[in-house]
Amino acid sequence: MAEDKGGRPLKFESAEELQMKIEEYFESCHNEAGDLTRPYTITGLALALDTSRKVLLDYEKRDDEYSYTIKKAKLKIENFAEESLFTSKQTAGVIFNLKNNYGWQDKQDVGLSGGLNNTNQDLSSLTAEERRARIDELNRRRGNGASTTT
């Protein structure tokens, strides 16, 4: 059995053995005709490897071939989840999975220069004309036709 740098034996003799077990997991998600019968998941992979999800993710943090092997498997699982967004009508669980397991985020970036999206911004250093221009820009972006110019 391979040994961890901390002295604890690793579950797999080699990264090749780990890769072989990972491939068996992905194959087990399909029937004999090759049709998918269950989704790819991190927990499913951990169960197939007879380990815990935490141990699996610890392997990912290593600085060796084990890490690469796990990262590649996780990427395949993430790709499966991402593609599910386009093929499934039930996406809430997929979105939850992507956010909690892969760092995906809901993000609105309106790209306003000068922090126009921050309505609590201190405008006291701006001239009256600059303040009016900022307020007009905010109103325009919000769809409010109000203007500060007369």
Image: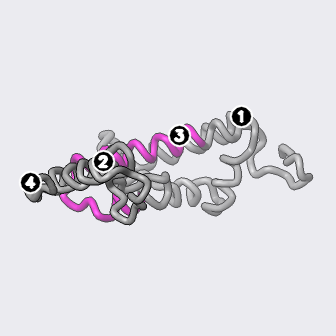
Q: Residue 83 location in percent, x, y? A: 31, 44
Residues at circles 2 and 1 in contact by the CB criterion of under 8 Å = no
CA separation in Å, label 4 and label 2: 15 Å
Quadrant hosting residue 27? top left
Question: From the viewer's perspective, is 79 left or right of 13?
Answer: left
Question: Tag 4, which secondary structure?
Answer: loop
Q: Quadrant of the C terminus?
A: bottom left
Residue 150 circle label:
4
- Looking at the image, residue 86 lies above or below residue 121: above
For the point 36% across and 54% down, the residue is 107
Question: From the viewer's perspective, is 66 left or right of 101?
Answer: right
Q: Which residue is mark 3?
A: 23
Residue 68 included in the magenta stretch of the image:
no
Quadrant hosting residue 95? bottom left
For the point 33% across and 63% down, the residue is 119
Question: Tag 3, which secondary structure?
Answer: helix
Nearest to the eye among marks 3 and 2: give it: 2
Q: Dot 4 surroundings within 10 Å: few (below 14), some, or many (20 or more)? A: few
- What segment carries the magenta color? 71-97
Q: Which residue is mark 1?
A: 65
CA separation in Å, label 1 and label 4: 68 Å
Mark toward the start of the polypeptide (3 vs 1): 3
Question: From the viewer's perspective, is 141 left or right of 22?
Answer: left
Q: Dot 1 surroundings within 10 Å: few (below 14), some, or many (20 or more)? A: some
